[in-house]
Amino acid sequence: MIIESLSIVDFKDKTATSYDFSDGTNLIVSTGNKKGKSSLLKSIYYTLGFDIRQFPSGWNISNKVFQLKV
């Protein structure tokens, strides 16, 4: 499966975030901790139907819509 993008919309906070992925292999890296790497991966897993036991603190997933473009 090739993921083109992930969109997350928060209806309560009225915010939206989109992540676009390139063709081929994509690496998710940052210069430190607490930058959102695990949150991004958990969001992809959740959108694919996996049971995510713990989202980042402050996230209320009932207010969010997750969409993958494959």
Image (cartoon, rainbow, N blue to C red):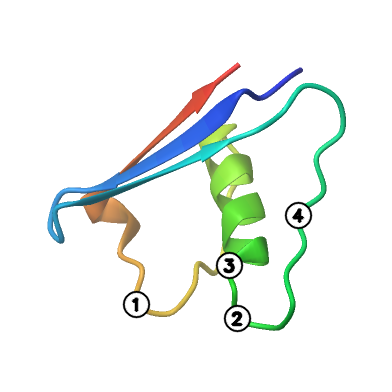
- Left or right, residue 30 beside residue 64: right
Looking at the image, which residue is at 68% across and 83% down?
Answer: 33
Looking at the image, which residue is at 36% across and 68% down?
Answer: 59
Q: CA distance from mark 3 to mark 4?
A: 9 Å
Which residue in the structure is indicated by mark 2? 34
Dot 1 or dot 4: first in sequence order is 4
Question: Does dot 1 land on a helix, a strand or a loop?
Answer: loop
Q: Residues within 10 Å of mark 4 (few under 14, many from 20)?
A: few
User: In the rendering, at what x and y percent does residue 17 appear?
Assistant: 37, 47
Dot 1 or dot 2: first in sequence order is 2
Q: As shown in the figure, which amino acid type bears the numbered disc 4?
A: Ile
Dot 3 or dot 4: first in sequence order is 4
Question: Does dot 3 land on a helix, a strand or a loop?
Answer: loop
The label number, if any, that marks residue 58 in the structure image: 1
Quadrant including the N terminus: top right
Q: CA distance from mark 1 to mark 2?
A: 13 Å
User: In the rendering, at what x and y percent does residue 28 appear?
Assistant: 75, 54
- Left or right, residue 63 beside residue 68: left
Which residue in the structure is indicated by mark 3? 36
Q: Return the residue nearer the eye: 38 or 48.
A: 38
Q: CA distance from mark 1 to mark 3?
A: 13 Å
Q: As shown in the figure, which amino acid type bears the numbered disc 3?
A: Gly
User: In the rendering, at what x and y percent does residue 58 appear?
Assistant: 34, 77
Question: Does dot 2 land on a helix, a strand or a loop?
Answer: loop
Q: CA distance from mark 3 to mark 2?
A: 6 Å
Quadrant including the C terminus: top right
Mark toward the viewer: 1 or 2? 2
Asked if disc 3 and disc 2 are in contact, CB closer than 8 Å, the reply is: yes
Which residue in the structure is indicated by mark 4? 28
Q: As shown in the figure, which amino acid type bears the numbered disc 1?
A: Gly
Q: Residues within 10 Å of mark 2 (few under 14, many from 20)?
A: few
Q: Residues within 10 Å of mark 3 (few under 14, many from 20)?
A: some
